[in-house]
Image (spheres, rainbow, N blue to C red):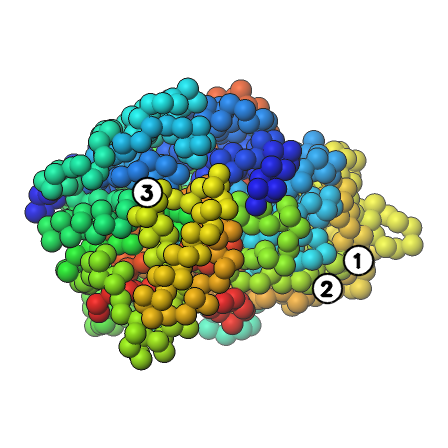
Amino acid sequence: LAFVLRSLSSCRVLVVGAGGIGCELLKNLVLTGFKKIEVIDLDTIDVSNLNRQFLFQKKHVGKSKAQVAKESVLRFCPSANITAYHDSIMNPDYNVEFFRNFQLVMNALDNRAARNHVNRMCLAADIPLIESGTAGYLGQVTVIKKGQTECYECQPKPTQKTFPGCTIRNTPSEPIHCIVWAKYLYNQLFGEEDADQEVSPDTADPEAAWNPADAAARATASNKDGDIKRVSTKEWARSTGYDPVKLFNKLFKDDIMYLLTMDKLWKKRKAPLPLDWTEIHHLGACGTGLKDQQVLGVQGYAQLFHRSVETLRSQLIEKGEGAELVWDKDDPPAMDFVTAAANLRMNVFSMNMKSRFDVKSMAGNIIPAIATTNAVIAGLIVLEALKTLNSEFDQCRTIFLNKQPNPRKKLLVPCALDPPNPSCYVCASKPEVTVKLNVHKTIVQALQDKILKEKFGMVAPDVQIEDGKGTILISSEEGETEANNNKFLSDFGIRNGSRLQVDDFLQDYTLLVNLIHSEELEKDVEFEVVGDAPDKAPTPSVPEEGKNIANGNKDSAQPSTSSKAAEDDDVLIVDSDEEPSSSTMEASPESSNRKRKHHGTDTDDAASKRKRLDQQPADDDEDIIALD
Amino acid sequence: PVERKKQSNIISEEEAAQYDRQIRLWGLDAQKRLRGSRVLLVGLRGLGAEVAKNLILAGVKGLTLLDHEQVTEESRRAQFLIPVDADGQNQAQASLERAQLLNPMVEVKADTDAVGSKPDDFFFQFDAVCLTRCSKDLMVRVDQLCASRNIKVFCGDVFGYHGYMFSDLGQEHHYVEEKPKVVKGSNEANDGPEAKKPKVDPNETTMVKKTVSFCSFKAALEVDWTNEKAKNNLKRIPVDYFLLQVLLKFRTDKGRDPQPDSFAEDSQLLLQIRDDVLETMGLSSELLPNTFVSYCFSEMAPVCAVVGGVLGQELVKALSQRDAPHRNFFFFDGLKGSGVVDYFGSK
């Protein structure tokens, strides 16, 4: 032990993330004797971090997490040599050479995209990686070593359950459907309009048709999105001057009445009850709890709707011509709007309404977090780190932290590490995948963004068609293949059986993609990865948490605004943090409006960065071999 | 302490913002109870500092840091609250400033007395007491004193790679658990003869009240192993329980814990004590193989973090009266990464 501790001072380690786990980890590393530590985090400090990220105080709100963490640690260990980066780990500056500087990398992240990326970088550099995550009372730590253990992507992680468009637009049955609808509505009215985020009744709903021929006819007759009006929601709103009462009546009365005409939908379901602005008379509730935790009545939410529409309308006017707002859970009128609209819709569909507090949890993908869980996990990370640095990989374990002891009395459950998956599409020697899609309907942009980046975790893909000519379909160099973006794959001669060679040079990763052409994909499904677990497979529920608080993106892929909801699934827990405020691309650290620096793959709602995975039921499960 | 914690019903905006992520986990009610709780923490070395941090961040009303020892280079390096120039100062005093900065909303105090010198009624002002680095006799005394007054008692220590936590929440500890609601029949939003049942929100939950009892520390350590039933169960007993007995005896005999500086003589003594202790219990020395001596010297920081995290959370649970407490020991083995909860004592 003494020998290990002495040589620790010369070890260089990288900590990715300076949040909940990161703060605890930095403290543990330094107290254990590590001296050369580099820490990177793109985020800035928020007041809601202060219940657990103990290296930060109130006076630090708004400052860089990595920077302040470094300063706080130096205060109790001035001899530590810490380098802080206020930056995204996905920045190409942090290439394989950068990673090779370290003897060990430890993740303290909260989203899958970054985890996938660091996984690949560590494989490319052949540096051991310690992965971890927490959510609420639960946590997990594991060790990843190329060639010896599974990599982070060896086991396909379940992607998020998605709600079909017609559930969101026609037949919501749970509050989350209404909340997703409300967020779509925000974007349609005030933000960036998205064809995947329609809010009006869907006439092409297959359930609405009395016979299949009818459905087909409707589908081809109407617009692609089945919108009942030819004008977009935003255009319509503009034409009324964003009149809150007119908006209210359209959304909660007229559109609902239209839905009622689709009577087949209501044969086995309770029919929605339209609201009329002039008829609402109930008073709101009062209480002694947090104001946010009260559930207002319909009148209260109607008023809130009215107020927030007016405020957002002013915000739009202020920003000028062609302005678009970005939804942010910490922007009060934006949160008010979603709270109000979601609740009004819940009321229409006879669901119990939710407080702003609860709506914020769901809409903002907030995962509850406490100091102690992070403290335990960070302690375990360092213990695994010591074994790893001694190359004692046979001693390394995956360790699960439960909320309650399992039947064998274990609160902390160590499990043997698995060997690499020979068919892993990341760490196998010549990885290949097969993707099913419609070559006549998939455009190059979608291939790049939704398949290669979101699904397969690449950051800057280069794509060549194996057509004997080496045709370049996508180049990671900006602008080079922009002309291809809106063309269909079939335009390039791609058809059933075509193969694509995809490279991400930053990640030192090559993937061969086999394409299967299909015209029979389900509605709303753009592609399928052959051999993947089906998205809709039921997943084991989390035993510990009584309340299904968790939602939104537990997955790398889609922005939280899309029709996704969380299911408590298995696999790695993430120290989840909610959507950061405000939006998108590369913000410079100096920009006061931006909370964090972003990397290019992010899409609208900033929420895309917030990916979290669900929790492993940490009892001895079929998949886990617990050690005694 | 007060029979019932006074609950201020108003939670300020500042508290709501700061505690948001934990209120979303354990609820507002639990947070209010925490906010009314006063805790005594004895011992500010590695483990103590971790517990202090966890309780202060959680938002208790008051935390008293009690430690009569002076800061040495070794003790300063073991924790993150003491400034680098504080050698020679009292440990609790030196930790105070940084501890307070963790959360200005908590009243943090330092007390430089030795806990053994405190009169009985000193303890009665607290809702919970957490003892680290205390002798067995002291822990037994304080536990006896407090548990009968519904003061929650916790003990914990870290010895090298090993650590433990013990709790005595009294004869009748009441708490609530949140369970998913089972809804029968239609909910009130239904109306009309043709109305179909709307889908029940699977997220709705209900609070269930429970009660559990704990035994004293004395009873927990004086389990009789000579009867047949106990002997048969031995295989399932964490060895750490016996390791704890050995280390507590060492502490009593030597007035300190095993130190790396005296590794040779301390190791010898540990093996001797192991033989004595197990023999007195009527058990074989093989139960605790010799290798244990290599791994129980000094406090390892990551082990303090793990044990301090579990101990801190148990304090939070007990004070907030929410969620089933671990009953009554938690043992952590940092070599294996295993953490076990087990009950010792009169059932």
Residue A359 x, y percent position in the rendering = 34, 47
What amino acid type is highlighted by mark number 1? Lys
Distance, label 3 to label 2, CA atoms, is 57 Å
Q: Residue at x 60, y 61 (%)?
A: A417
The label number, if any, that marks residue A340 in the structure image: none
Looking at the image, is mark 2 or mark 1 nearer the viewer? 2
Q: Secondary structure at mark 1?
A: loop
- Callouts 2 and 1 in the same chain: yes
Is any atom of residue B236 visible in this view? no
Mark 1, Cα crowd under 10 Å, few <14 / some 14-19 / many 20+, is some
Residue A199 x, y percent position in the rendering = 44, 50
Residue furthest left in the image: B3
Q: Is residue A121 left or right of residue B109?
A: right
Residue B251 x, y percent position in the rendering = 34, 47
Give the camera-side residue of A559 and B45: B45
Residue B302 x, y percent position in the rendering = 47, 44
Distance, label 1 to label 3, CA atoms, is 63 Å
What amino acid type is highlighted by mark number 2? Pro
Q: Are marks 1 and 3 in contact (CB under 8 Å)?
A: no
Q: What residue did someone put label 1 on?
A: A430
Q: What residue did someone put label 2 on?
A: A422
Q: Residue at x 9, y 47 (%)?
A: B4
Is any atom of residue B198 visible in this view? yes
- Callouts 3 and 2 in the same chain: no
Q: What residue did someone put label 3 on?
A: B255
Q: Secondary structure at mark 3?
A: loop
Q: Are marks 2 and 1 in contact (CB under 8 Å)?
A: no
